[in-house]
Amino acid sequence: MKIVRRIGAAPRERGSQTGQTCPDIFELEDGDFAVIGREATAELDGELPHDAARADYERIVVITRETLLRAKADIPDA
C-alpha cells in the first residue's frame, strides 16, 4: 500500500504552526483514501445511525471541517 498524493491543502497551508501534526487526507495507489484524524471511536460509536456499523478493526476518526472542505476540489468524481 502506497500513498499517491495528498488530497487538499497541506497542514501548514491550513494554519498549522508546525505543519506536521494535523488532520490530513491521502489518496492511495489502489484508489482508496487514508485519513489522519483525532481518534473518537469511544465518543461516537454509540451515536452511529442504526444502519451504520463498525468492525472491530475499524476506528472512527474526526477531521476538521476545513480539512474536508479544502480537499473537496481534489476528490475525484469517479
Image (cartoon, rainbow, N blue to C red):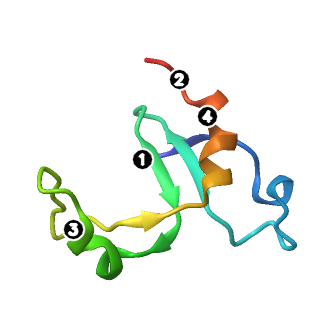
Q: Residue at x 42, y 32 (%)?
A: 31
- Label 2 Cα neighbours within 10 Å, binned few <14 / some 14-19 / many ≥20: few
Residue positioned most to the bottom: 42
Q: Determine whether, in the image, residue 23 is placed left or right of residue 9.
A: left
Q: Earlier in the sequence, mark 3 or mark 2?
A: 3
Disc 3 versus disc 2: nearer the observer: 2
Q: In this rendering, is residue 33 above or below 30?
A: below
Q: Circles 3 and 4: CB distance less than 8 Å?
A: no
> x and y percent of residue 73 in the render?
66, 28
Residue appearing at x 12%, y 50% in the figure: 51
Q: Residue at x 45, y 43 (%)?
A: 33
Task: Give 12 or 31, whichever is nearer the viewer.
Answer: 12
Q: Amino acid at mark 2?
A: Pro
Outermost residue toward the top in this view: 78
What is the total number of numbered labels drawn onto the structure image? Answer: 4
Q: Which mark is residue 58?
A: none
For residue 15, side relative to residue 21 (left or right): right
**Between discs 4 and 1, the one toward the N terminus:** 1
Tell me the number on the disc at residue 1: 1
Residue type, mark 1 in image: Met
Question: Pointer 1 and pointer 3: residues touching (CB < 8 Å)?
Answer: no
Q: Which mark is residue 72?
A: 4
Q: CA distance from mark 4 to mark 1?
A: 23 Å
Q: CA distance from mark 1 to mark 3?
A: 17 Å
Instruction: Tell me the residue that label 2 is attached to.
Output: 76
Amino acid at circle 3: Tyr
Quarter location, residue 43: bottom left
